[in-house]
Image: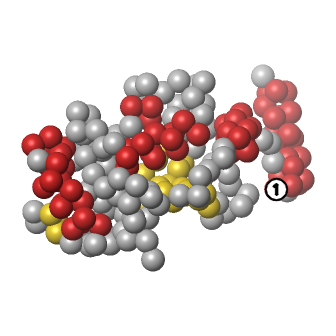
Amino acid sequence: MLKIWHMKQKQVAADAAEGPAKRRVTAAQLRAQKDITEISLPSTMKMDFPDPDDILNFTLTIEPDEGLYRGGSFEFTFAIGSQFPHEPPKVKCKQKIYHPNIDIEGNVCLNILREDWKPVLNLNAVIVGLQYLFLEPNPLDPLNKEAAEDLKNSKDMFARNVRSSMQGGYVRSERFDDVRKR
């Protein structure tokens, strides 16, 4: 047992001596790289990698060109864990927006990010799902229950609240971020 431990220590020391150029690539990194290379974003979206050496953490900006959220710019952070693709990426909206499926803290309610995630799904499926949330908000599976109730009870009131909130206004006593495209 001591011999195995000693051999492992030598391997760790050798890896450290080789420096960052010889880092091992994880299964999550390989799958993320594959998924990212297969993504074909429309002109209403863009991806950004703040650290070019870290493909597991990036941002996605969505600028809907139709629907109630048209004219807005919404940024989502993606954090891909070491268990990807067996676990979904963690996705959060950076802005405080009025949406039935995105709460005040930016958590996103999208079924494929929770119970319906399967390893055969890829990052493109998540991106398409996010885009769809802006075209068809779902009041039946809400994180923001007030927004969901507004959408169910009065689409006109919901539309007014979306417009007001996107300009940095208040809905009830909650102030939202100005998300208009600049």
Residue 10 image point, x, y percent: 87, 41
Quarter of the image where one finds residue 7: top right
Q: Where 170 sits versus 79, above or below?
A: below
Q: Nearer the viewer, residue 64 or 95?
A: 64
Quarter of the image where one finds residue 133: top left
The colour mode here is secondary structure
171 left or right, relative to 117: left
Residue 143 image point, x, y percent: 25, 43
Q: Residue at x 44, y 57 (%)?
A: 64
Q: Residue furthest bottom?
A: 182
Q: Quadrant of the C terminus?
A: bottom left
73 left or right, relative to 1: left
Please indicate, yes or no, whether residue 147 appears anywhere in the rendered image.
yes
Q: Where 33 sits versus 21, above or below?
A: above
43 left or right, relative to 154: right
Residue 81 image point, x, y percent: 57, 41
Q: Which residue is mark 1?
A: 20
Q: Residue at x 43, y 71 (%)?
A: 181
Q: Residue at x 86, y 55 (%)?
A: 21
Amino acid type of disc 1?
Pro
Please indicate, yes or no, whether residue 107 appears anywhere in the rendered image.
no
Residue 13 image point, x, y percent: 84, 47
